[in-house]
Image (tube, rainbow, N blue to C red):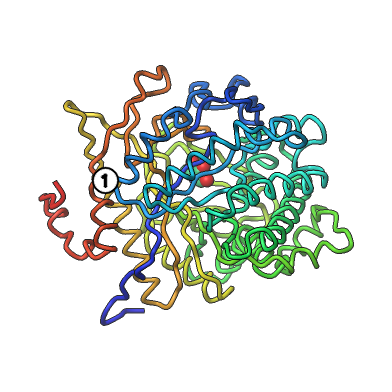
């Protein structure tokens, strides 16, 4: 759809940036915090790039005031961060850790004092290890009650000041990486268990949304879904079918549950045929259908193009690139359903992630048309190598290009009629990229550390810091005048 004039960003558009506790906080065993599964998992040899972990991360726990000062300088309207469950309940349940509550309370107050809207993620992958030891974490329905109690504690303490909440971050990834590809804790390769875990996570998600209505009636809550819209390789009907298989099994399988409380019919059939269906108990679907979110939270980085994949001898799990060696990933798929294929129209990053701003617009339109829900973009950004030059300069034009084109795609989606509440870039500072160490950088603020050494953890504003500052200040209007930057002159210096 082409428009004669483009929509402008709404006046109260939430220009933001995001992070997650394990990736930034450090202080893994301070302040009364208990260990999470990530504290344990990253210490098993061979699990992460160069054996990196989040013990210190970027030390946000001790430096949060400095970080918030930088956010205020940039003009952020919102900052999305996650709470480490095991900081609040070191054993996952039972006695609350006041010091943990105080840390986030201080962070929230600091943000508000700087006119930044705090946005809390309840769960960003770091379940307390104690619950894993006691009942297998997400594999037991006991987690639903414990997660609910933890969430209620946060609602009661912070609900008076925090309006925007994210329930589960990338549920589709923590279940698939945790139980299908065995890349995340607990490192299991068993698709039956994955679908069981996933169903339990769905129920937990619904339960906390129900509680939220009671404790924070004026607030807004939704999950943040890792959304990779799919494309068919070409117009061959077999590839169109592969595309539909992947949409049903990888996207609608989650979003239909969030929005409507039901699984897509054909994906469910696939599960039945392969003995993968989760255990359904009486009342499950009622609970799921009763907990409609206020928005669909979307983490968008890329699209995936697919074609057919034979049942016999088809491509399976593939290989992920966690080193930044371009081209080292291998196609993945599900035999009889689909497999990924290279899209000849798209460039990729050094970690083999296709760069596709138009895919964001397409995804936003798909969500709006299917669910009639507003969208909150909870993550989007470019993970790349950055170079710290003399004089504390980081010229990350590649990041500016990426963000600019994606923000323009949002503007196009707004023009198409999609309601978008806000945009959180990933991430504010550089941080630990889970399996990829510290060299895959996403931030507006460079952190002086690497895999080998924590160095001085100094905060250094990158060129993109000033660029986004200008975007926020002009509520997106500065994007219009940016041909100058593309011609080599930087109007923001
Ligand atoms: C999604 C996750 O939520 C976040 O933790 C991660 O670092 C980014 N994607 C980049 O991979």
Q: Is residue 266 above or below residue 441?
A: below
User: Residue 390, can we see it?
Assistant: yes
Residue at 64% across / 51% down in the picture?
155
Residue at point 66%, 67% (across, down)? 292
In the rendered image, residue 488, in percent from the top left (x then y), is placed at 11, 50
Name of the residue lying farthest toward the bottom:
4
Horizontal side of residue 58 vs 128, given as left or right: left
Q: Nearer the viewer, residue 175 or 447?
A: 447
Tag 1: Cα neighbours inside 10 Å, few (<14), some, or many (≥20)? many
Residue linked to disc 1: 464
Residue at point 74% right, 57% down? 207
Q: Is residue 140 left or right of residue 344?
A: right
Q: Is residue 445 above or below residue 363?
A: above
* Vertical side of 333 occupied by 61: above or below: above
Which residue is at a point 86% across and 64% down the rendered structure image? 283
Answer left or right for 199 relative to 471.
right
Q: Position of residue 176 (x, y in %)?
A: 65, 45
Secondary element at tag 1 = helix
Image location of residue 294, percent across then percent down? 58, 67
């Amino acid at each position: 759809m082409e428009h004669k004039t483009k929509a402008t960003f709404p006046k109260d558009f939430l220009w933001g940036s995001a992070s997650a506790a394990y990736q930034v906080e450090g202080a893994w065993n301070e302040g009364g915090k208990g260990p999470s599964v990530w504290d344990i998992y990253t210490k098993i040899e061979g699990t992460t790039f160069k054996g990196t972990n989040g013990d210190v991360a970027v030390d946000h726990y001790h430096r949060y005031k400095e970080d918030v000062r930088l956010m205020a300088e940039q003009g952020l309207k919102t900052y999305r961060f996650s709470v480490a469950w095991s900081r609040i309940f070191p054993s996952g349940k039972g006695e609350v850790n006041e010091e943990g509550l105080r840390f986030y309370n201080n962070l929230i107050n600091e943000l508000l004092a700087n006119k930044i809207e705090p946005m809390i993620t309840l769960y960003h992958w770091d379940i307390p290890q104690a619950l894993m030891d006691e009942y297998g974490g997400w594999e037991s329905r006991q987690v639903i009650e414990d997660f609910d109690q933890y969430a209620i504690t946060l609602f009661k303490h912070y609900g008076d000041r925090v309006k925007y909440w994210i329930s589960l971050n990338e549920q589709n990834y923590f279940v698939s990486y945790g139980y299908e590809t065995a890349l995340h804790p607990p490192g299991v390769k068993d698709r039956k268990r994955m679908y069981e875990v996933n169903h339990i996570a769905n129920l937990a998600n619904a339960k906390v949304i129900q509680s939220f209505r009671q404790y924070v009636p004026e607030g807004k809550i939704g999950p943040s879904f890792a959304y990779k819209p799919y494309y068919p390789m070409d117009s061959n009907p077999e590839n169109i079918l592969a595309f539909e298989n992947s949409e049903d099994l990888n996207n609608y399988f989650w979003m239909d549950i969030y929005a409507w409380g039901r699984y897509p019919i054909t994906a469910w059939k696939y599960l039945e045929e392969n003995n993968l269906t989760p255990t359904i108990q009486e009342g499950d679907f009622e609970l799921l259908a009763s907990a409609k979110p206020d928005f669909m939270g979307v983490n968008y980085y890329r699209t995936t193009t697919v074609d057919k994949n034979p049942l016999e001898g088809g491509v399976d799990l593939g290989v992920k690139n966690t080193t930044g060696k371009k081209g080292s990933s291998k196609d993945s798929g599900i035999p009889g359903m689909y497999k990924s294929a290279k899209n000849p129209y798209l460039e990729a990053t050094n970690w083999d992630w296709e760069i596709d701003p138009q895919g964001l617009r397409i995804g936003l339109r798909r969500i709006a048309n299917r669910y009639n829900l507003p969208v909150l973009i909870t993550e989007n950004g470019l993970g790349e190598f950055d170079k710290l030059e003399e004089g504390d300069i980081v010229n990350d034009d590649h990041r500016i290009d990426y963000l600019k084109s994606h923000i323009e795609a949002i503007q196009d989606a707004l023009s198409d009629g999609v309601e978008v509440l806000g945009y959180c870039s990933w991430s504010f500072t550089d941080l630990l990229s889970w399996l990829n160490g510290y060299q895959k950088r996403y931030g507006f603020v460079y952190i002086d550390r690497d895999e080998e050494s924590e160095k001085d953890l100094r905060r250094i504003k990158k060129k993109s810091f000033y660029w986004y500052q200008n975007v926020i200040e002009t509520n997106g209007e500065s994007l219009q005048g940016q041909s100058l930057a593309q011609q080599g002159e930087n109007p923001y210096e």
